[in-house]
Image (cartoon, coloured by chain):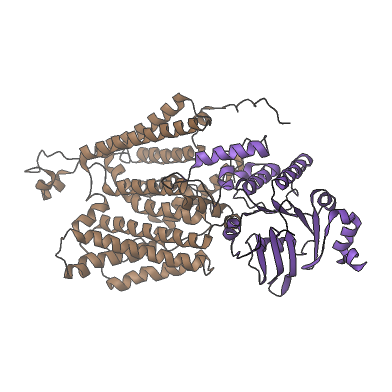
Chain colours: A brown, B purple
Amino acid sequence: MSDPVAPPPTQRKNLLQTLEIDTRMLGMIGAFALVCIVFNYMTDGRFLTPRNIFNLTIQTVSVAIMATGMVFVIVTRHIDLSVGAILAACSALMAMTQVRWITEVLEIGHWAIPWITIVAGITLGAVIGAVNGWLIGYQGIPAFIVTLGGFLIWRNVGWYQTGGQTIGPLDKTFMTFGGINGTLGGPVSWVLGIIAVIIAIALIFKSRTTKQKHGFPVKPMWAEASLAAIIAATILGFIAILTNYSVPERVIARDPAKYGCEVAEGCEVVYGLPISVLLLIAIAGVMTVIAKRTRFGRYIFATGGNPDAAELSGINTRMLTVKIFALMGALCAIAAVVASSRLANHSNDLGTLDELRVIAAAVIGGTALSGGIGTIYGAILGALIMQSLQSGMAMVGVDAPLQNIVVGSVLVLAVWLDIQYRKRTGAK
Amino acid sequence: MTTPLVEMKNISIAFGGVQAVDNVSISLNAGEVVGLLGHNGAGKSTLIKMLSGAYKMDSGEIYIEGNKATIQSPRDARDYNIETIYQTLALADNLDAASNLFLGRELTTPLGFVDDDRMEAETRKIMARLNPNFKKLKEPVSALSGGQRQSVAIARAVYFNAKILIMDEPTAALGVHETAMVAELIQELKKQGLGIFLISHDTREMMDLCDRVAVMKNGQMVGAERVEDVTEDDILSMIILGKNPKAAA
């Protein structure tokens, strides 16, 4: 009956296919590189300095954290317009907790203050998200409406909490999550970088051996090796740049002892990896594992691809919606920690328009609004591209209205390109 | 007389003002194929969707192997070893064959993560049996042909040791060769002792594949007869006129 002769293995066509690199991601990295090179040229080399790259990364973190959650929301064919407002509400609660409420019980500077604050903030975010998810999943109100309402509600709930005041200064430990106030210095950054490289290489070869065990085709050894080399070079290059940004002397002069020097003169200290970036990397890792390796993630993508099929497969899609929005809310709270501590205080307008930046980052990163498609790394790259455009234009001195016109056009262009790409490759 | 594998008694369901299924009873024995026939909108799919848990019936009772069963959701139906191949196939187009096959029942590693490699290996095994030409294991099922998609849906129903199989128009999208393959598979599953509900519009095909045919019209059961007791014309008149010629005789 069936042909006993095995068909010849499918021919590997070109280099990219051999490396099994996603061409879409390559396109995005290309676009990002182009943005960087153009701005670097226009700013006479000021764009690609360690200092600017450092600033760029810490400015991206807050939006990027939320964008990873937005991927799940959009993949299941929903939208969340309230993320900026939830961020503000959580930030307000956390600011009030650490500056006003807790200090009536604990002394200012007590070690537990930042942690109690963060737990309270994340709880609030998750509860708000869960309520959104319940209204959407169980009550059938469209996500657009629920979160449009939330957009108005939550920012003003924040306003009520603070009475409209700017709350600060925030706790010292809390502020280490903001970026410039919390960096790991040279040696620790390098150690972490090397650990990351080792983990990456171990994962690549572990996946190879598992595939071989099941008798699946694997890439040639040189392809695995070059992939590992590219990843290692990227990680170490990034660390090298961040450890090349020295703390300015005037900053050291404020408190030389903090940097291990007697006086500011001749004191050479580098910033290294910011804790906020480390936080983003950890969140990206966890979210990627959720997306690819857990049932929760599998159900998110299945529901996005075909909600009816997911339902018929016994997936509780309503509860899934609650979980996705609760996760989104929790991520907004974490983003609130980063955003408020970067500015050293909470203000009413924190996170204004972030919902649009977050959605744009996810969409530029290849998340399809029709559902079922999206990646975590794509959303982070999308956030990075958006932030580079904005910072770059500010550095070049583009007028404010023009800046927004460009960002808006880029968003539309990115989606158009994505549609063309999917048509070409036949992917849906 | 042995206990039937499935007994659906006095089942009714209404959508808005429309009585989609009206006081219908039907049974299915182990190793038996029962065909459901009728016009579009006769209530065939609705009836079996209550067995597969997609709809909740308004009234009536379902007995599985003589015991009263409560089927509120697709998950409940799966717990009774009821598997369904839907007319729409119910595949998540953006996922690959293995993810679809195991959707809702993923194999996991000891740490609780989904074990894609093991699922792919299992998918290879079952596909080698069902459709030896099936090679596109890594691609999303949207990239597959109609027949290949159908084999994924069939594999999903067969893999988990179903006792009761519901096939809603399993051959509607298939070519001649693939249709023959499905027919062969039905015979094989029957031999293994499964009970199969088959829905189709093709009277000829039903006469060949089924042991009994049941005809529905306007949500009501016209009659269920053994295929050797009726002619194709009898069945057609049942479908069209809604009268059982044997009962009238």
User: Is A7 drawn above or below residue B42 in the view shown?
Assistant: above
Can the viewer see residue A347 in this picture? Answer: no
Residue A131: x and y in percent read 43, 68
User: How many numbered marks, from 0 up?
Assistant: 0
Location of the N terminus of chain A by quadrant is: top right
Residue at 64% x, 45% y is B155
Q: Is residue A289 above or below residue A80?
A: above
- Expressed as whole percent of the image width and height from the top left, the position of residue B61 reads 67, 68
Residue at the far left in the pictured view: A262
Give the vertical position of A190 relative to B152 (above or below). Answer: above
Q: Residue furthest right?
A: B249
- Residue B249: quadrant of the picture: bottom right
* Side of A76 relative to A189 (left or right): right
The front one of A357 and B60 is B60
Q: From this viewpoint, is residue A60 visible?
A: yes
Report whether B161 appears left or right of A331.
right
Q: In x, y percent, where is residue B181? A: 74, 41
Measured from the top left, where is residue A161 in percent x and y?
29, 72
Q: Residue at x 44, y 24 (%)?
A: A222
Pick the residue in front: A178 or B81: B81
| Left/right of residue A412 with respect to residue A289 in the rendered view | right
